[in-house]
Image: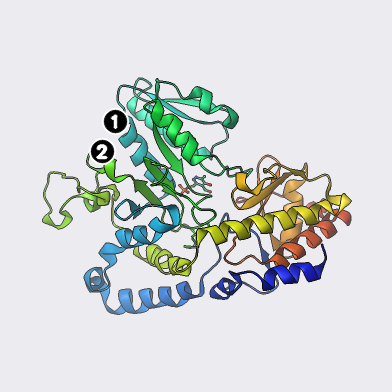
Amino acid sequence: MNFDEIRALDEADPLADKRLEFDLPKDVIYLDGNSLGALPRTVKSHLSEVVTQQWGNDLIKSWNSHQWIDLPIKVGEKIAPIIGAAPGQVICCDSISVNLFKLLCSALALNSKRKVVLSTEDNFPTDLYMVQGVSDLLGEDLCHLQLVNELDIEQHLTDSVAVLLLTQVNFRTGKSLDMAKLTQLAHDKGILVIWDLAHSAGALPVALDQCEADFAVGCGYKYLNGGPGAPAFLYVATRHQQLVKQPLSGWMGHAKPFAFDPLYQASSNINQFQCGTPSVIAMSGLDVALDVWRNVDMLTIQSKSASLGQVFLRLMQSHQSLDDLTLCSPVDARQRGSQLAFSHNDAYAICQALIEKGVIADFRAPNMIRFGFTPLYTSFEDVWLAVSTLKEVVESKLYQAQRFKVASKVT
Ligand SMILES: Cc1ncc(COP(=O)(O)O)c(C=O)c1O
C-alpha cells in the first residue's frame, strides 16, 4: 500500500469530520482510545460552565435548576441507542466493578436454586474479583465461581449454572464473542447472562434487546470518551426490573429519596440501581461527550474499524522486520472489537519507545502491545504513521535502551 491509497481512504471516510469534534494534541498518533477516549471539544467548555456557573454561582439550586438529579437517567438514555437498548433500561452510575456487584447479587437471587457463576479464565480480572468477593460474602453454597477457557464456554452451559458472566470483547486479544448465540444457548439452560461491554460500547454495534440480554455493564471512559474515571453504566432488561432487588440500597435508588423514610423502598424502575449521590462533574463530562454520537450509525463505525485494522495488518505484513510481533487478535475483523494485539518478548519496551516517538499504544501483561482504533477520530494516516514508527523503533533497536525497561505504575 502506498501513501496515496491511504490518503484516498481518508478522503472517502464518512466519519472524517468527527475528528474535528475532538481536541487531539498535534504530533501525537493516539491509538489508545480503547483505554482512555480522547477529549471531545464540547466537554472542555461544558465542564468549565458546570464548575463556574452551575456549581460556583448557582450552588445547590443546580440539583433542580440544572437537573443534576436527572443526570444518571439522562446519560443512561443517551448510551442506550449505542448498545441497542430501548428506553428505561440503562442508567449511568458508579464503576463497572460496583455495578457488577449489584448485578451479580441480583442475578444470583433470581436464579437462587443454582450457585455457579461461569466465566472465562482471561476475563478482565475485576470481573472475576467481584465474583470472588460475592462468594466470600454469601458463601460458596450460594456463589461459586467456575472458570473455563474462552473456547469451551458452550460445553459448560449446564443446568447447574446460575449466571454466565462474559466480557464481549476480550481486553487483551480483542476477540469478540457471539452475544446472540451465547445468550440464547444460556437461556435454553435457564442461565442468566451478564455482559461486560467495556470494549464493545462505541466500538461495534451491540444489540442487547435483540439478543434478549438480561444484564450488562460498560464503561464511560473508553470509546464513549467521558474522561478519566468517567462513571460507568448498567443495563437491566425491563422484564427483570420488578423481580430484582439490588443489594447496594442507597438513598438514590429509593422510590422517594427526599421523603427521608427510615425504611428502604426500592424504586420500581431502573433508578433502583443507583446507590449514592452521583458524581455530577464527571457525569456532566460524559453527558456532553455522548453528543458526538448523534447521527452516527454503528454500522459505519464497524466498517471503518474493520478497515483501519485491515490496513494496519497489511502495512505490518509488508515489513519483514516486524515478523517477531505475533498477532494475537482474530484476522477476521468480524470476530474482533476495535483493537489489534501483538505479543513480543519486549512488548513493554517497544510500547514505551513508540510513546516517546509520539505513537500512543499500550501494554498488557504478560507480553502484549495493543493498538486501539477509534473510528470517530482515528485516521488512516494515523495507522500509516504508527506502523512506520513501529518499523523504525524495531529496526533501529531503539526499544533496547535501558530507559524503556523500567515499568511504570500504570501500563
Ligand atoms: C473488560 C473490563 N471490565 C472492567 C474494567 C474496569 O472497570 P471499572 O474500573 O469501571 O470498575 C475494565 C477496564 O479496563 C475492562 O477492560
Q: Is residue 119 left or right of residue 338?
A: left
Q: Residue at image x 85%, y 54%?
A: 318
Badge 1 density bin: few <14, some 14–19, many ≥20, Cα 10 Å: some
Category of crowding for the residue at label 2, using alpha-carbon neighbours closer than 10 angstroms: few (below 14), some (14–19), many (at least 20): some
Residue in the image at 15% along x and 58% along y: 258
- Mark 1 to mark 2: distance in Å? 8 Å
Q: Secondary structure at mark 1?
A: helix
Where residue 302 sits: x, y (%)?
57, 56
Indicate the amino acid at tag 1.
Answer: Ala
Compared across the picture, whether 266 is left or right of 27 comes to left
Q: Are marks 1 and 2 in contact (CB under 8 Å)?
A: yes
**Residue 85 position (above or below residue 56):** above
Q: How many marks?
A: 2
Sooner in the amino-acid sequence: mark 1 or mark 2: 1
Where residue 180 appears, as percent x and y from the top left, is 47, 40
Left or right: residue 40 versus residue 137 is right
Percent of width and height locating residue 232: 42, 53
Q: Which residue is mark 1?
A: 109
Q: Amino acid at mark 2?
A: Val
In the picture, which quadrant includes the N terminus? Answer: bottom right
Specify the label residue 207 is tagged with.
none
Residue visible at 28% across and 45% down in the picture: 238
Q: What residue lies at 34% left-to-right and 64% top-to-bottom? A: 280
Can you identify the residue that label 2 sits on? 244
